[in-house]
Amino acid sequence: MTIRNILIVFITAIALLSCDGMFDYSPFLIDFSEENRNVNQQNIGKLANQTHDDTITIAFTGDTHRWFDETEKFVAKVNQKPSVDFVIHVGDIADIGLPKQYFWGNSYLLKLNIPYFVVVGNHDLVGNGLTAYNEMFGSLDFSFVYK
């Protein structure tokens, strides 16, 4: 083997090893971490730890797909308001139902200091969006009792 061939093999190996984690095998791959699984049920469990007063205050948001700057501002504003008991996201956290879009949207909501719940929207159901929604947030049909 010549020095040139050794150099080519070395550079190719470095290039391949440095790309680890940069590419998805498929945009439809669903591989959520534990904090991104069954989120609605996890947050129902957190409701018991809420401090109680005589008023229930709920913040609503929706259609956050493609509006990450605004979502970040919404989360910051809600976190400044201790009177808010929980947040309901009324759908369209994803644009075309891709698991990565669910991940991006939920990464902002995870920064909330209070529980939050995400219901499904029409954009969330495109492609394999229903499967991604069920994996990340749980069943379409859920309920809870608060106070």
Image: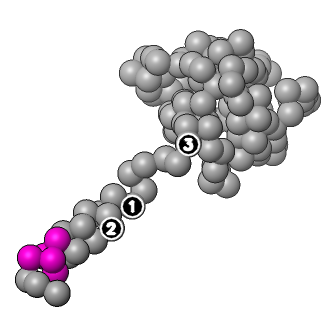
Q: Looking at the image, is 22 positioned above or below residue 69?
A: below
Look at the image and say whether residue 127 sits in the magenta stretch: no
User: Gap in Å between the C-alphas at discs 3 and 1?
Assistant: 15 Å
Q: Secondary structure at mark 1?
A: loop
Q: Nearer the viewer, mark 3 or mark 1?
A: 3
Q: Residue at x 68, y 20 (%)?
A: 126
Distance (Cα) linking label 2 and label 3: 19 Å
Q: Which residue is mark 2?
A: 17
Residue 23 drawn above or below residue 106? below
Packing grade of label 1 (10 A; few <14, some 14-19, many >=20) is few
Category of crowding for the residue at label 3, using alpha-carbon neighbours closer than 10 angstroms: few (below 14), some (14–19), many (at least 20): few
Image coordinates for residue 38, horizontal then vertical, percent: 76, 44
- CA gap, disc 2 to disc 1? 6 Å
Q: Residues within 10 Å of mark 2 (few under 14, many from 20)?
A: few
Element marked by disc 3: loop
Q: Which mark is residue 139?
A: none
Q: Is residue 98 visible?
A: yes
Q: Which residue is mark 3?
A: 26
Residue 6 in magenta stretch: yes
Numbered disc total: 3
Q: Main secondary structure of the magenta part?
A: helix
Q: Which residue is mark 1?
A: 20
Q: Which of the two discs, 2 and 3, labels the residue nearer the N terminus?
A: 2
Evaluate if marks 2 and 1 touch, with contact meaning CB atoms under 8 Å apart: yes
Q: Residue at x 71, y 15 (%)?
A: 121
Query: The magenta stretch spans which residues?
Result: 4-8
Q: Position of residue 39 (x, y in %)?
A: 72, 41
Seen at 89% across and 29% down, the residue is 142
Please, what is the three-letter code of the amino acid marked with disc 1?
Asp
* Relative vertical location of residue 21 with respect to residue 106 in this rendering, above or below: below
